[in-house]
């Protein structure tokens, strides 16, 4: 017993000394560490993370460190350091995300480092701009089918409406037909488990799974679903590699490396990545358009100029024939990009600092988790004048044909590992918004909803309901 108490006091003393040293070292960025060993500032940070970070920015400036749950997380919340973040050879993105991938989808460390570059390259190539033609016609058909289920008129919570439309479309395109359920009961079960998994994702990436009972249950539900479904999803093997689904490309690579047993885990990661942000971006895009009459007018003029006046019996034919061949900027888009600029992830691009680095007169120690935060950079009026306003016209300066966004637009990452599905996601959202407004006239029945500012991972979701009434355009 005495040995145990002595060891405990030594550990606590060393931890306290470490925290005290980090707070007082003038060469390092200011560190908010709290006084509880290992937990550090975790409790306060977790209560209201965006407010906590904003207060830290006001007090300490654009670069500071938070010690929480045994990690030193150094935030870069303004433009300083962006070039270093994406161009330096002394930071490592893979090591920063590996731990989170292991916790959230249980991909082992050795398999992650073996296949990360291979799988990233496959997805990036499959979903690059020049390959989007593979998806366009199928997207239009799938979206048309889902919009037909809405009928000629009705009322619904807008977030649920978007989710009910986009879940099956995205799943069918990424994974192939057969995974998404077809009965009402099974669809509700799928939605419930994904919502549990998605909402607990940021906690699951940090906290042991045993403390997240509902989240763990939904995670296991999906792993079991994929384990049963992947053999059937792989059964169709077209001769043309361009026709392979994204899931088939990934499982094929894993099989060649004799690691196909991890295919359900990677499939779950793909499911989360393809659905988690697409739904809120589509939701907020529709909300911003409906709350900005001039934007709505411009978008409708663009849509009508492409499709003509909407007539119900011509909807399917016009959308299938015209939309796949329509230039991306002819319908006052990309409005989804404007939404992502306004509501970017608070925790954006992560990396591990391998060597000490001098930034704004501070030395960032080796081993720190670096966090480049789009949430505040996107609110910098230097790069985004009137940053809180929904202004599609600011994107007229972006050259999408050259694969470029606006300066300091960081929602999709950058450097060596930008989001491989960014163009796929924007294409799907642009087509969905265009078809929805082409087919229906929408009216909001509730005030503009509040955002979940406690959400750090991904685009903020609404925390208050917003009902919408829709009627077919005549």
Image (cartoon, grey):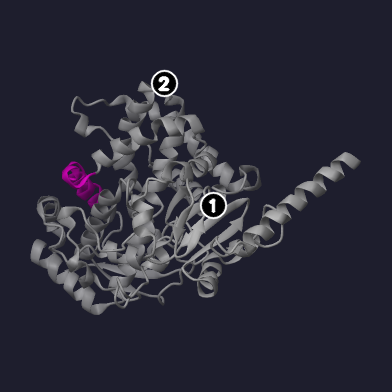
Give residue 298's quadrant in the image.
bottom left
* Residue picked out by circle 2: 258
- In the image, is 272 to the left or to the right of 322? right
Mark 2 residue crowding within 10 angstroms, few (<14) / some (14–19) / many (20+) = few
Image quarter in which the C terminus is found: bottom left
Query: Element at badge 1?
Result: loop
Query: Would residue 126 be counted in the magenta stretch?
Result: no
Q: Is residue 470 visible?
A: yes
Image quarter in which the N terminus is found: top right
Query: Would residue 141 be counted in the magenta stretch?
Result: yes
Q: Nearer the viewer, mark 1 or mark 2?
A: 2
> Residue 412: percent from the left, percent from the top?
33, 54
- Which region is colored magenta? 128-145
> Residue 48: percent from the left, percent from the top?
57, 67
Measure how far apart labels 1 and 2 are at the Cα level: 31 Å
Viewer-nearest residue: 373 or 278 = 373
Query: Element at badge 2?
Result: loop
* Residue picked out by circle 1: 200
Viewer-nearest residue: 352 or 101 = 352
């Amino acid at each position: 017993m005495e040995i145990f108490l002595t060891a405990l006091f030594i550990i606590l003393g060393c931890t306290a000394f470490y925290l005290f040293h980090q707070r007082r070292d003038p060469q390092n960025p200011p560190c908010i560490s709290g006084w509880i060993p290992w937990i550090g500032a975790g409790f306060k940070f977790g209560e209201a993370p965006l407010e906590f970070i904003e207060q830290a920015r006001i007090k300490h400036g654009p670069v500071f460190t938070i010690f929480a749950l045994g990690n030193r997380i150094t935030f870069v919340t303004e433009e300083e350091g962006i070039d270093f973040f994406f161009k330096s050879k002394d930071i490592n993105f893979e090591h920063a995300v590996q731990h989170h991938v292991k916790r959230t989808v249980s991909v082992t460390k050795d398999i992650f480092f073996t296949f990360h570059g291979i799988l990233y390259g496959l997805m990036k190539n499959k979903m690059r701009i020049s390959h989007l033609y593979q998806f366009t016609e199928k997207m239009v058909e799938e979206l048309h089918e889902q919009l037909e289920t809405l009928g000629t008129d009705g009322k619904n919570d807008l977030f649920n409406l978007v989710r009910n439309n986009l879940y099956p479309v995205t799943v069918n395109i990424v994974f192939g037909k057969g995974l998404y359920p077809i009965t009402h009961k099974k669809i509700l079960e799928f939605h419930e488990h994904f919502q549990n998994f998605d909402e607990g994702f940021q906690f699951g990436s940090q906290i042991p799974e045993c403390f997240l009972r509902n989240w763990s249950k939904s995670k296991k539900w999906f792993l079991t679903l994929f384990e049963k479904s992947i053999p059937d999803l792989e059964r169709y093997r077209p001769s043309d590699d361009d026709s392979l689904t994204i899931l088939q490309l990934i499982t094929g690579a894993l099989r060649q490396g004799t690691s196909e047993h991890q295919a359900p885990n990677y499939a779950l990661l793909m499911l989360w990545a393809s659905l988690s942000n697409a739904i809120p971006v589509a939701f907020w895009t529709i909300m911003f358009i409906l709350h900005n009459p001039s934007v709505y007018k411009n978008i409708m003029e663009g849509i009508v100029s492409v499709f003509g006046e909407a007539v119900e019996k011509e909807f399917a034919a016009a959308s299938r024939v015209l939309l796949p061949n329509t230039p991306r900027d002819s319908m006052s888009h990309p409005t989804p990009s404007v939404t992502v600029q306004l509501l970017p992830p608070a925790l954006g691009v992560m990396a591990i600092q391998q060597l000490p680095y001098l930034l704004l007169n501070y030395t960032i120690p080796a081993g720190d988790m670096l966090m480049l935060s789009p949430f505040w950079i996107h609110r910098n009026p230097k790069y985004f004048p009137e940053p809180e306003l929904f202004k599609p016209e600011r994107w007229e300066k972006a050259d999408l044909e050259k694969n470029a966004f606006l300066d300091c637009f960081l929602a999709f990452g950058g450097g060596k590992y930008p989001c491989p599905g960014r163009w796929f996601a924007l294409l799907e959202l642009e087509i969905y918004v265009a078809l929805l407004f082409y087919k229906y006239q929408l009216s909001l029945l509730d005030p503009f909803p509040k955002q979940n500012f406690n959400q750090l991972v991904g685009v903020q979701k609404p925390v208050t309901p917003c009902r919408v009434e829709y009627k077919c355009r005549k």
